Every structure is written in C-alpha cells, then in structure tokens.
Image (cartoon, rainbow, N blue to C red):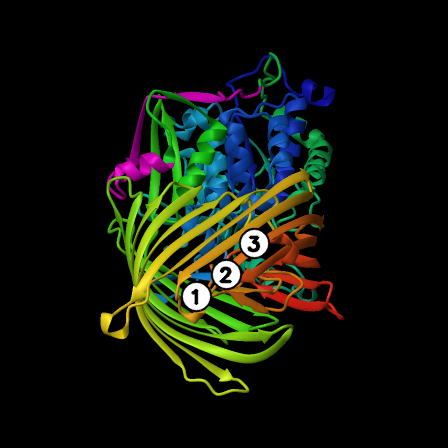
Amino acid sequence: MLLVACALPLCGARAQRVGVALSGGAARGLAHIGVLKVLEEAGVPVDVITGTSMGSVVGGLYAVGYTAAQLDTIVTTEDWYRLLTDPVDRRDLAVERKFTEDHYLLTLPIHRGGIKLPKSVVPGQRISQLLTGLTWSAHAIRDFRALPIPFAAVATDLETSKAVVLDHGFLPDAIRASMALPSVFSPVELADTAFIDGGVVRNLPAQDARVLGADVLICSDVTDPLEPRDSIISLVDVLVQSVSFRVWDSEAEQRSKCDVLILPEVRGFSTFGFARARDVIARGEAAARAALPGIAAALAKRRVSRRAGAPRSPVIEPESVLVTSVRFDPPDLVPGGFLARALGVRPGSWVSRRALGQRMSRLYATGLFESVGYRIEQGDLVVLLRERAGGRFGLGLRYESRYKASVLLSSTLGRVSGGLNGRADARLGQQIQIGAGVSQPLGDGRSFTLGAAADYVRSPFDLYQGDHRVAQARVDLGAITTSIARSAGTLADASLRAKVEYARWAEEVSAVASNPIYRAFYSVAGVVQVDTYDRGLFPHSGVGFRAVSEWGNRLTVAAGGVAFSHHTADLRAYLPLVRRVSLWAGATIGASGGEPPPHYQFFLGGANTYYLFPDRDIAFVGLRTQARRGRHVQKAELGAQWELAPDVFARVRWNAGTVLDRWSFDPARYVQGAGVELGAKTFAGRLSLSASGNAHTTWPIVEIDLGYPF
C-alpha cells in the first residue's frame, strides 16, 4: 500500500488514465475479482475497463459501480448449477405441460422439416435474467462510455469470425454476447448479427482498453494454456482445446500492449468449477499483491495522481420499481391478453427485482419463446421476446419389470404467432400407442384451447384368479377425440371431451377359448387436474389431484345401446417435515355404472403407475401388476420419503384397498400391502428398485423402473 502511495504524486502534468483489461476464462475468470479487490485496497484508480467472456461479466458489473466485495458476494452466493443448466421450474409450467415435460430423455429442435442438433447445451435464459437484474441502474444507458467507468466488451461475429467491440447498446445483452461460449451457450443476436464468445479471437482485450483511453494498462489474464494430449479425455476437453488454438493466436500481441501483466495461478481449477469461487478469487488476490511493485512503477512512470477521497461506494440498486407502463417487443407476437396474464405485472404497480425475475421465468416456461428478457427505462417496462422457431422432437426411453423396454417418439409443430399446433406421438413396446392431434388456443387470453386427436392403442391385460395369473387379454382400440380445455395457469385446468371409440377385447392366453368382444361407442367426459408438485420425480411438496367423469353408450341403436359411466378421483399430497424428509398421503376412488367395456374396469397392483390408462391402472404395493380388477376401486396410502443424498431417495409406503363388482364400504375386507424403495433421479430419468408384499406373499415382489414415465 505504502509503495503504491509513494508512486502516486499529488501533482503532475496532464492526468493519465488507468485501464484494466480482463480476459476470458470461465470459472477461472473469477480471479479478476481478487485482482480488483487489491487494486481498490491499494488506491489504484480504474478509469476504463474492458473484458472478454467472464472478464466482461466482472468488468461490466464493476463499470456499473459494484465494488469488488459486492462482486465476491454475488458469485459466491449464486446457484451456479441453475445458471449453467437453465432448468425451468416445474411450478412455472402450465398443468398440461407438467405432465408432458416429464416424459423425455432428450428433446431436439425441428427446423425446416428436419430434426437438428441444438445450437447449444444451455439457452442462457437464467444468465441473461441475472445480468438484467444486476444492471437496473444502467438500463437507460446506451453508450457504455457514459457508465461510471467507461466499458467495452469483446465478442465474435459468428458469420465473419471477426472480433467486435461492444461499447454501446443494452449492457446485459453485450455481456451475454461476449460470454456465449460456443456449443455451451446459445449465440446472441444483436442488430441482425449473431455473436459468440469474444475469447475465440481475442481473449485478452488489451488493445480495446487502449482505444478506450487507457494510458497505463493493467491486464489480468487467466487464458487457458494448451493442454498435453494425455490430459484431453472428454468431449468438453476437446472443445476447449480446439477453441484455445485460435485464442493463443492473439495472446502474445495483446500481452505486449500491457504495462503490467497479472497471471493468477488458476490452472488447477476446472473450466466450470464455480463451486470453488472463493479459492479462485484468492488466487487473483495473491497474484495482484505480487504485482503491486510493478503497478507502482508503471503509475509513477506516467505520473498518475492518486485520487483522494473515501473508498469506492457500493452500488445500492433499488429493491423495487414503479412500473408506469408495460409493452412487449415485438408487440404482436402473441395476443396481449395472454402475455399480460402470464406476466402478471400491471401498470401503476410496484414490482421487486426478485418478483420481476420470477414473472419472466413464468413467461419463459410457457415454452413459446426462445428467450424472454426485459429492460426498465423511467418506469417503462419493455418485455423482450424472441419467438421459438419450428417445433420440437422428443425421445423417451424406459424399462420396467412388467412391460420391459418402451420407446416414446414425439414431435410438436407450430408457430407462436399462428397459434395452431400439431403433435404426433408413438409409444413402442408391449404397450403401443400411436396418435396425432391439433390444438388451437382461443381468445385474447388464450385460456381456452380447442383440440382434436386420433389415437390407436394396443395393450396387454393380465387376468388373475387369486394370486395366480390365469390368462392374458389384449385390447386394440382406435379413438377420435375432440376437446375444449380451460387453463387456470400453473395450478389447475379443466376440460370437456367427446370421443368415438372402437375397441376389440380378446383373451390371447387362456385355458378356455372365448370369443373376442367388439365394441363401438361414444362418450363424453369432464376432466379436472390440479398439480402443485415442486418436481415431477420424487416430489418433496405439493398437491396432485385428478378427477374424470365419463358417460358413454353404444354407437348405434341396432347394436343394442347399453349406457355406461366411469368416474374416478385421485388425490395425493406431499408435506415436507424437514429439508430432506417428507410425508405423503393419498386416496383413490372409482366407480362404474351400466355395462362399461372390459378395458374400462379398474386394475389394482404394481408399485409403479402406468400411463396408458392412468384412470384405470392403479398402483398398489403388495400386489402384482393388475392382480385385482373390478368395476369399483377404493384405495388409501401413506408414505415417507428421505433424500439420502442429492437426487438419491429412500421411500417406505403402506396402502390398503380393494376392487369390487358391487359398491360397498367395508375396510375390514381391504387388502393391505407395504413396500420399500431405493430410487434416484438420473440423466435417464427415474431409477427405482422396490420390494413389496402383503400378509399372504411368501417372497417380496421385486420391481425395477428406469426412465421417464410415459
């Protein structure tokens, strides 16, 4: 400190400007925060600052006015896993999307009629929201030279491969463009130009700091060195090494422009090792302290005056802002009523930064947009939307004990502005379902949806006598359905549907030959769903409810019309006790009237839920899949869940219930069962090993379930 102070004379000639250039380096770039800490402590003025990639994040926020201590707090308290994986919170999804989003192992974009690989692993929505929220005070500033510290970021033009200096525009967008690491984060489009990470062509923006006016230039460089061949063992290693070839082309030239070069020792830290942020920052501090004599000499040589006054004041961003108007850009992408309802911000209301971030997440979770952002200028909230082009192709895989391996192939097509969407699905395996449908949102608020679908289903059914399987039947059915649905946002929806169905029921494996049953009928049904689960697999809290009431009859009077009805309701609630332990309770009741088709009976048994006939196949531990069937069902269950480690779960549950041909309520006749389960959330979906039994079983029933449910 004293050394630097002595080198900063109070009097001198023309005032010289001190610049700082910060390199890219992903998590290693957090070392720049440590460098800035030491510069602040030593009283070294920072008059201009430039950054590339992570250097642009640190430099841009520092230019807005954040102190190094504030930056330290930000990076060490953020949930970097969420920032780098861009998950959509399940509670932000509409109810109908909560079910379908839990299906897929992999989704790919459909563009120009073909299935394509995505442009990146991570869209970058959460990173953009974070930067937008941290720069409220600079939203109205278009020239970055007008920031408290003049600033510029470096990005790469994806089309020309040229370095582009971003020194004007919307600051969060410029920072986000500079850090768009190829294949990891999506490119950023600004004024019809697509940008990727500036580190591809100029990882250390020294020359840009000189152009911005730096007379004395201090550079902090954490550029990755080229790795030896034997250390390149993964796809990411190959990607980083290939990008580094181009990075090092400019390194020598850029370093030669620095008066002081600080090289934090961060080679032992991984590219995405944000969990070790404190250690990386400490390495930056150590390197900067070692460089203080060189900094003092450089400042003395140019006669830089030390600036009197208090240490840098921390930025105090407002916690909330008064929104005087709301508009969407572009204005006619989606009906305004729908956007206003999804956003939930009204003109004349105060909104906090956290609440505004949550509203943007909810809007993004509709799945209609490639990205959702915002800017605030003098109370004017501008919501920035980018339409999701084309459709999506989804792939689901699963294996479970009863039906073995299954594959789900699904595609959705349609554009936001047109509203009309199409889908085609194929589930292949012992259970087959092939279908196609279209849907059209109605009204300015798009809270109603009109739909039509055609489906073919084939599924085996096990027939038991006591605890022994004595026959196997198969149902083949084709159905045409029309529906109208009413969405109540992220919590509930209700629908009415009319269906014409043709079904064939035949016993394929049986000791006694029986003629197949053919049935053509129509039905009308009402469905109500509520879903507030915090996650689709192994929920910790929330409520799920589904009720279906259906009435049907033979399609023609000549066939001897026989009316029937089918009603079911399922309720389940999870209550968290402590952070990793929760209890749940559930109940299912169902009843049939008249003469329903055979596949409309209720089937009880199996530890896992089956989704081809979710209103009729009822999970029940202690019984084999479909071990009981009847016209009515009653079931109650209790369970406890303990998260042993992140995404690893132990569960115990008890259930009691029965199926009946005539409705009665006699709990003394209920079958009881209990089971234990060890499960995990994996990249392939749910992994579960369960064992269950009842008072009459000699050996436990062991079941395996792997994959996403569909």
Residue 456 horizontal side relative to residue 86, left or right: left
Q: Nearer the viewer, mark 1 or mark 3?
A: 1
Question: Count of labels shown?
Answer: 3
Disc 1 target residue: 600
Disc 1 or 2, which lies upstream in sequence? 1
**Is residue 615 at all visible to an observer of this figure?**
yes
**Residue 335, magenta (yes or no):** yes
| Place of residue 36 in the rendered image (x, y in percent of width and height, measured from the top left) | 62, 30
Q: Residues within 10 Å of mark 1 (few under 14, many from 20)?
A: some
| Place of residue 343 in the rendered image (x, y in percent of width and height, measured from the top left) | 37, 35
Disc 3 target residue: 248
* Residue type indicated by callout 3: Trp
**Residue 251, magenta (yes or no):** no
Please give the range of residues in magenta: 314-342
Please, which residue is most extreme toward the right here?
698
Q: Residue at x 41, y 24 (%)?
A: 146
Disc 1, SS: helix
State how far apart marks 3 and 2 are (Cα): 79 Å
**Is residue 213 at all visible to an observer of this figure?**
no
With respect to residue 60, does 504 lie above or below? below
* Residue type indicated by callout 2: Arg
| Place of residue 545 in the rendered image (x, y in percent of width and height, measured from the top left) | 49, 47
With respect to residue 17, does 549 lie above or below? below
Disc 2 target residue: 662
The front one of 625 and 391 is 625
* Residue type indicated by callout 1: Tyr
Q: Are marks 3 and 2 in contact (CB under 8 Å)?
A: no
The front one of 591 and 93 is 591
